[in-house]
């Protein structure tokens, strides 16, 4: 394909995949693996082949828990060599605090202090490993930090333990002089019935209770907010507004189904479009990490199609966002909806006693406010037509 293809992934797009995403073997609660296990080195080469920018991993995706120190060193050496050979980079790493049976009651929030200490030790080692392979963002997803029964754990105690653990790890990073920031990833449920800090908004409030909030941001995930029935783009906007959008996990999800990790944009294309439009409009410069996996029906070739599809869909919507921003009719409707003749300027904005006095005395033309139609039906239909491809750049005009 020529370099000018706007849908060809390039390094500057910062598309990344976890080792566990394209490496997913299709094992689920009901069935065995359907695909071969790929080594980290194989995955790095696969990602280079499909045009990705980076690879992320959990400690044990790279180094198996049972590896000896010399095995660890060999694995890390081979991985770094593969990165060098392919030009793939490692922007993010994380700790697997979910798989080991020791974490059945949580990791940082487990009732057993030995489990909490083990979780900290695993995180310290995971941080060292991530830094060694170049990661500058370290994600915390508390997959087991929750309950099945509220009889089992005091949520205030759990929050206290969670806070203590993150404070400890922030202090470690500072102590070591690492160039590393943390990104917290919320999820409402799965694998546990109820996870603590279930939404991006909860995480955002929580991180400001930490000792070093400046080191800590968010890693919102599309499916996690959708599982809670929320508007993901709004959560991302709030994270951005707070200066806390450190990372993002892109995938898709059919609301109220099991945790699906679908190819980005494949289930809710309109929501995905507005998400891409948001990220591009504000100039988000971080990784676009696809935390998703191929359908269980797919073979190795299907996995590559899945990965290419995630990136291509992102770029398709990026181009559609550009068209949306340049479409005269769409922009006229947006502008009309927000039209401001300045009549309210004396009353709006920062409070003053004078302003409030004037506002209290103002008589509104409520009949006019109540009758006004906002033409959002037309605006949304034009959006759909743009996405469906029947509203090309010929009609869009120039911005
Ligand atoms: C999930 C999560 C994970 C995390 C990963 C990185 O639902 O399983 O999204 O994939 O993102 O563990 O922390
Ligand atoms: Mn997820
Ligand atoms: Mn995720």
Image (cartoon, rainbow, N blue to C red):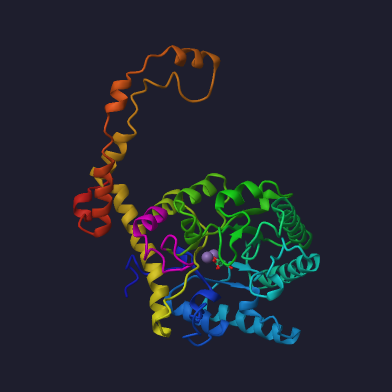
Q: Between residue 392 and residue 235, name the one nearer to us.
A: 235
Q: Between residue 28 and residue 49, name the one nearer to us.
A: 28
Q: In which quarter of the image is the C terminus?
A: top left
Q: Is residue 399 magenta?
A: no
Q: Between residue 186 and residue 88, name the one nearer to us.
A: 186
Q: Main secondary structure of the magenta part?
A: loop
Residue 8 figure quarter: bottom left
Q: Residue 34, percent across and down?
A: 46, 86
Q: Is residue 272 magenta?
A: yes
Q: In which quarter of the image is the N terminus?
A: bottom left
Q: Is residue 39 shown left or right of residue 176?
A: left
Q: Residue 305, percent across and down?
A: 38, 77
Q: Name which residue lies at 66% across and 50% down.
A: 207
Q: Name which residue lies at 30% across and 26% down.
A: 370
Q: Name which residue lies at 78% across and 65% down.
A: 112
Residue 238 drawn above or below residue 359: below
Q: Residue 45, percent across and down?
A: 50, 82
Residue 301 drawn above or below residue 387: below
Mark count: 0
Q: Name which residue lies at 24% across and 49% down.
A: 382
Range of residues picked out in magenta: 254-276
Q: Residue 174, percent across and down?
A: 75, 58
């Amino acid at each position: 394909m020529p370099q000018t293809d706007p849908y060809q992934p390039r390094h500057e797009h910062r598309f990344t995949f976890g080792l566990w995403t394209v490496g997913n073997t299709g094992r689920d609660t009901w069935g065995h693996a359907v695909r071969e296990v790929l080594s980290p080195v194989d995955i790095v080469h696969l990602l280079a082949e499909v045009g990705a920018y980076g690879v992320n991993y959990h400690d044990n995706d790279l180094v198996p828990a049972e590896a000896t120190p010399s095995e660890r060193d060999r694995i890390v050496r081979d991985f770094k060599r593969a990165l060098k050979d392919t030009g793939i980079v490692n922007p993010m790493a994380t700790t697997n605090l979910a798989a080991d049976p020791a974490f059945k009651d949580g990791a940082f929030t487990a009732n057993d202090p030995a489990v909490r200490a083990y979780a900290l030790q695993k995180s310290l080692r995971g941080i060292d490993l991530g830094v060694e392979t170049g990661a500058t963002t370290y994600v915390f997803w508390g997959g087991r930090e929750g309950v099945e029964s509220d009889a089992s754990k005091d949520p205030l105690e759990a929050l206290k333990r969670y806070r203590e653990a993150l404070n400890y790890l922030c202090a470690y990073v500072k102590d070591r002089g690492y160039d590393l920031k943390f990104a917290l990833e919320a999820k409402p449920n799965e694998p546990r019935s109820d996870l603590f800090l279930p939404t991006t908004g909860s995480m955002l409030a929580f991180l400001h209770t930490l000792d070093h909030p400046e080191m800590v941001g968010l890693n919102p995930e599309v499916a996690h907010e959708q599982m809670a029935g929320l508007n993901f783009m709004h959560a991302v906007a709030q994270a951005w507004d707070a200066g806390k959008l450190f990372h993002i996990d892109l995938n898709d999800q059919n609301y109220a189904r099991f945790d699906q990790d679908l190819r980005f944009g494949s289930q809710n294309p309109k929501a995905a479009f507005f998400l891409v439009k948001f990220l591009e409009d504000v100039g988000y410069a971080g990784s676009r990490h696809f935390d998703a996996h191929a359908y269980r029906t797919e073979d190795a070739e299907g996995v590559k199609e899945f990965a290419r599809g995630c990136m291509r869909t992102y770029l398709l919507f990026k181009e559609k966002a550009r068209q949306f921003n340049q479409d005269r009719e769409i922009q006229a409707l947006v502008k009309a909806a927000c039209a401001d003749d300045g009549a309210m300027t004396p009353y709006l904005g920062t409070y003053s006693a004078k302003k409030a006095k004037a506002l209290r005395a103002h008589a509104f033309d409520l009949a006019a406010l109540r009758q006004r139609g906002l033409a959002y039906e037309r605006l949304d239909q034009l959006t759909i037509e743009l996405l469906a491809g029947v509203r090309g750049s010929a009609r869009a005009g120039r911005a």
